[in-house]
Image (cartoon, rainbow, N blue to C red):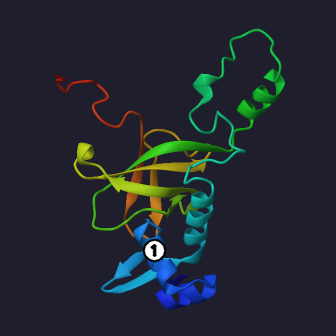
Amino acid sequence: MSLNRSETAQKLNVSLTTLDNWRRKGCPHTKTGKQVFFEIAALKRWLDNRSSGELDYTQETSPFECRMGWAVDMDKQDFNGRASLDELKANVKTRVVTLRIPSAEVDYSGAVLALDGTEVGFAPLAVPSPLVDGDFLAMATVANGSHKVGTRLELKGHVGVEAEIVSMPVYDSDRIKVRS
């Protein structure tokens, strides 16, 4: 359910000035003409992420969920903490992925992501990239199993817009561009 500025400020017990400051900092919202609307759930997730440093992960996120599994040498012989790491690796719940979203004059920050109508993740910040023809790039946290490269995710609240999970690096992965 979308709420206008006044309704959102009242619901969250903040001033309109605070709400406008959040918008300038990238909180999720939509515009219809000059009217601005907010989805409370997406706004709360955005606020939660900001309080944790605007990262797509928290202190509870395992290295296997946030693309840091390479930093854990599981080929070593037995070591302290190995059993815990084995358990974390076997029970990954979420994954950090990179999304490419078609260019538009809309801010996709804070987008809720869905696969076949089921919510599977959240993209706190999306930015246009000149390296991919002005399309938006976003880091997102999605449910394990929804993280494969090539998977297309719906952006709730943005009818007909799909984000594609892409591999890293997004730009010039084949190193074709000449460097000086």
* Quadrant of res 107: bottom left
* Quadrant of res 12: bottom right
Query: Which quadrant: the N terminus?
Result: bottom right
Query: Which quadrant: the C terminus?
Result: top left
Quick one: SS at disc 1?
Answer: helix
Residue lying at 63% horizontally and 85% vertically, measured from the top left? 13
Give the x, y percent position of residue 67: 56, 34
Q: Left or right: where does residue 127 sit relative to residue 80?
A: left
Q: From this viewpoint, is residue 119 visible? A: no
Q: Left or right: where does residue 113 sit relative to residue 30?
A: right
Circle 1 crowding by C-alpha within 10 Å: few under 14, some 14–19, many from 20: few
| Residue on which disc 1 sits | 21
Residue lying at 42% horizontally and 35% vertically, measured from the top left? 167
Residue lying at 33% horizontally and 68% vertically, measured from the top left? 106
Give the x, y percent position of residue 26: 43, 65
Residue lying at 45% horizontally and 57% vertically, measured from the top left? 125
Q: Residue placed farthest to the top in the image?
A: 77
Q: Could you tell me the amino acid type at mark 1?
A: Asn
Give the x, y percent position of residue 90: 74, 32
From this view, report whether residue 78 is shown above or below residue 87: above
